[in-house]
Image (cartoon, rainbow, N blue to C red):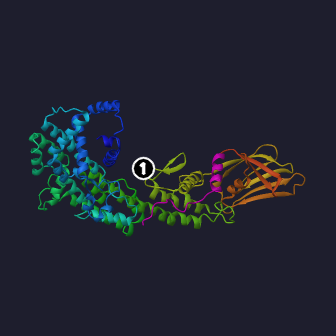
Amino acid sequence: NFLEKYKISKENFLSGIDELQKIDLSTSQQDDISVKLSIEKLYNVAKIQRIYTLLNFIILDKNNKVYNFKNELGFAANNVFSESIKIDSIEEIYTKKGMADFLQTLNVKIDKAIEIDSWILNDLSNSENRSNMAMGIIKIYLTQYQNKWQEILNSLAPKKFISKSSMLNELNILSKKENPLMNFIKIVSVNTNLNDATLLTQAYNLGVNAAEIKTSFMGITSSFDSYHKIIEQNSILNTGATAVGLDVGSHQKTMELINTDLSNIHKKITDFTTNNSQTIEEKIKYALSDSKDSSDPFSSLEQNIKNLPSELEKYYATLSLYAWNIIENHGVSLFNTVWLNEVYTPFVNDIAPFYPFNLLSSQDLSIDSFKNFFGKNGILNKFYEKYLTNVLIKRKNVYSINSKFSSRLTFSKEFLDFITKAGNLSELMLNANDVMRVRFTLQSLDLSADFSFVKVQYNDTSIIYDHTLHTKLDVITDEFNNGTSFDFTAYSYLDANINYTKSYKGEWAWYKLLQESKNSNSSYSVLFNDNKKMYFDFKLNNNNSDINNIIMILSDFKIAKNITKAQNDR
């Protein structure tokens, strides 16, 4: 109606009318132009609509009652219905009782509304067929009546709880045969089943066409028929007959099946979050799974609610999602537990204290230990294959969460940075068989004038640079072992018996050389006696990019203590 269109409440409108009555209009002059314009606008509105609008004011002025059916839903209603549901109160005229009162005095009120309409428009002619007017008014009323209940149903939604205890309480309430939602369905059914002899008789007494009015009443009844059948079905004793109107199977009633599903979901959440019958790996996989076994209570509920009206199906589907979030959040929180036990603790104890992860350490990490953690069969990759294969995706050497899990998982940036660096480090240093794959060619560039030549050697491989040809040394890191010494010996130009040696020891000798001697440009400088004037310069002829990446990763390599900040159970 017009008040709703312009968002004016009936109470405010009537209050304004009362205020107008208090104003002394004896000295005021009528604005004939405004009156004429108003009358023209009113004439553009169908008469039956004008009469119905006036009826609304007359009824509201005489009987401004509301029906608060929330009180009839049970004390637990606040625990199972969202705050957005429109059940606090509706005008009583949109209830079955209100309809009976509306029909009982409709003719009298129509007469009064017509009288007011004629006075406003200064039109005393009344050519409108009386029964047609009543029929038209009833149809408008029934349309609004149906819309009001449909609006209530469309707002139906479960209460969203984040805590496990509150969610379990909601499931427990709804799993009972008598519960607030069932009471809600009963109220909807009672007020939308207009196949009622008393109501029809009152309508017939208005002098309207009996067949037409019955068709209108039955139209509303049919629109909410699925709710009536639920109540009929729920009231029939389970004698083994198929449930009325709904094929639920096993001779059980639909709502009973759903109540059982909710009870089983309650048990599933309790077992999943408290018992140790499943391994952590199984729990995480279940929490992140897209498909479930047909016997799973979540799958069973999804199947059974298909037999319900769309509004109820939506309610239970949303409830199932909220319940699943408890499972999911707990499963995700277990990521941190397994990460701490399987990856973080071994790294902190067995990797982090040693060079090159701790540049200040005098002890080197063995390559075997490196492979045991970073290798294809290592700790980190086993963890990845066990828990993260479908969760993470890799694009351009950067790991991120698979989009289908992005709304469920909140992996920390620190974790994603770590897993990216660790994955890249593994690929840069190890081949598919976990053999060291780092190789580079060291090409001599320059030697300070204090020296006649420099000898570069590791194991049995060596080169000499004497200011002439730019000799090259192939460095194969897989050949380095604990006994390897990567030596740079420079011989004095003035005295061949004087020499200076710079040595790098062990399996990481090659890395110590590169990490220590790297310049800001692409060259490297070995300094003798830490004297910048006593130098040997070289460059890498190949794999320079890989070497730079290895140095960059290892220079700032930090492990994340937690994978995710998932909500913990409360």
Q: Nearer the viewer, residue 456 or 178?
A: 178
Side of 484 where 94 appears, left or right: left
Where in the figure is residue 532, as x and y percent of width and height?
A: 82, 53
Tell me the magenta residue range: 544-570
Task: Let me know if residue 309 appears in the view.
Answer: no
At label 1, counting other C-alpha atoms closer than 10 Å, the crowd grade (few under 14, some 14-19, many 20 or more) is few
Q: Nearer the viewer, residue 527 or 97?
A: 97
Note whether residue 258 is visible.
yes
Residue 566 part of the magenta-drawn span = yes
The residue where tag 1 is placed is 404
- Residue at left 48%, top 57%? 384
Name the image quarter holding residue 294: bottom left
Q: Quadrant of residue 54?
A: top left
| Quarter of the image where the C terminus is located | bottom left
Q: Is residue 413 magenta?
A: no
Residue 527 x %, y %: 79, 54
Name above or below for residue 182 compared with residue 149.
below
Q: Is residue 394 left or right of residue 128?
A: right
The location of residue 339, given as percent across then percent down, is: 50, 63
Q: Is residue 422 above or below residue 58?
A: below
SS label for mark 1: helix
Image-based side of 504 in relation to 333, left or right: right
Count of all numbered marks drawn on residues in the image: 1
| Quarter of the N terminus within the rendering | top left
Q: Amino acid at mark 1?
A: Lys
